[in-house]
Amino acid sequence: MISVIIPCFNEQESIPYFYDEITKVSNQMNEYDFEYIFIDDGSKDKTIDKLIELSQKDTRVKYISFSRNFGKESAIFAGLENSKGDYVVIMDADLQDPPALLPEMMNLIKNEEYDSVATRRVSRKGEPLIRSFFARMFYKIINRISDTDIVDGARDFRLMTRQMVDAILDMKEYNRFSKGIFGWVGFNTKWLEYENVERVAGETKWSFWKLFKYSLEAITAFSILPLQIASVLGVLLSIIAFIMVVFIVIRALIFGDPVSGWPSLMSVIVMIGGIQLLTIGILGNYLAKTYLETKKRPIYIVKNKNI
């Protein structure tokens, strides 16, 4: 069996198109049984109505509806947790992840003994230039500061064996960054490249600000370099402060001019204060994550489902 996990947030327009495409592919792959697990991530439109309608005419359609919007990471985890397939694939409902690639992905796993086949875009056609620039910068930064391999242009669209899925499910952390988790658990992964595909309907739910916060989540989830930078800045500023104290004392003893340089002194104070606030903010971010983890809150809450 192949379980297809589809996170949805306000995707009422895309779902019919996606269902038609994935049905065509599953009919071609008739040697496999399929289940389609749609995760309604607290949608405000008629997404859940579309899913209930599909489930009434096709028993392969399963749905889980959250009590509110918990985020795509929670939706992915819920899908993995409720999947029953020997192989599991994660796809977006907007058809930016082409279902037509699934037979090739399955062939690579079956015949070349990969544990996972992941996809990456070789272009960002259709994206705003500024967004594409910052996305590339993020991948460069995260791969320099983290031991986890996160490929530029990687999508959540990937096919995995049950063994890899079970390894991912063992990671119960509340603050999740799936691209990092996929890399962290290891396993033999084949990367499949394809040209960027624009949405079939609707609008993207990822604003620049949401992507920025998501990138910060990734950095703090898979790297402690910001904490190390804060420590280095503290040591560096302490050395500079000591040198300045020695310089001021010597100048006062030789020239008797202890009060000059007020503007430069204020500039230094403001700079040091800013760096202190920055490092406190970094520490606070990691502490907040620890705080959320210790609460042991559920990753998602189900309001309605047919699984």
Image: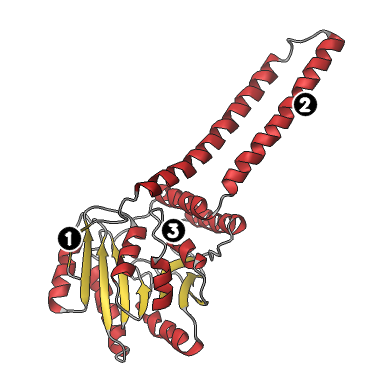
- Across and down, in percent, residue 174 comes to 38, 54
- Across and down, in percent, residue 220 comes to 50, 50
Going by the picture, which residue comes out furthest to the bottom?
Answer: 31
User: Which picture quadrant has residue 78?
Assistant: bottom left
- Across and down, in percent, residue 180 comes to 49, 62
* On screen, residue 152 above or below 33: above
The C terminus: image quadrant: bottom left
Q: Is disc 2 placed on a helix, strand or loop?
A: helix
| Numbered badge on residue 46 | 1
Q: Nearer the viewer, mark 1 or mark 2?
A: 2
* Disc 1 from disc 2: Cα separation: 66 Å
Are the two marked residues, 1 and 2, in contact with CB atoms closer than 8 angstroms? no
* On screen, residue 265 above or below 22: above
Under mark 3, the amino acid is Phe
Q: Is residue 86 left or right of residue 215?
A: left
Q: Which residue was labeled with disc 2? A: 243
Q: Which of 27/173 is in front?
A: 173
* Disc 2 from disc 3: Cα separation: 43 Å
The structure residue drawn at horizontal position 82% and vertical position 15%, both measured from the top left corner, is 251
Under mark 1, the amino acid is Lys
Q: Which of 197/73 is in front?
A: 73
- Across and down, in percent, residue 161 comes to 41, 78
* On screen, residue 121 above or below 65: below
| Numbered badge on residue 177 | 3
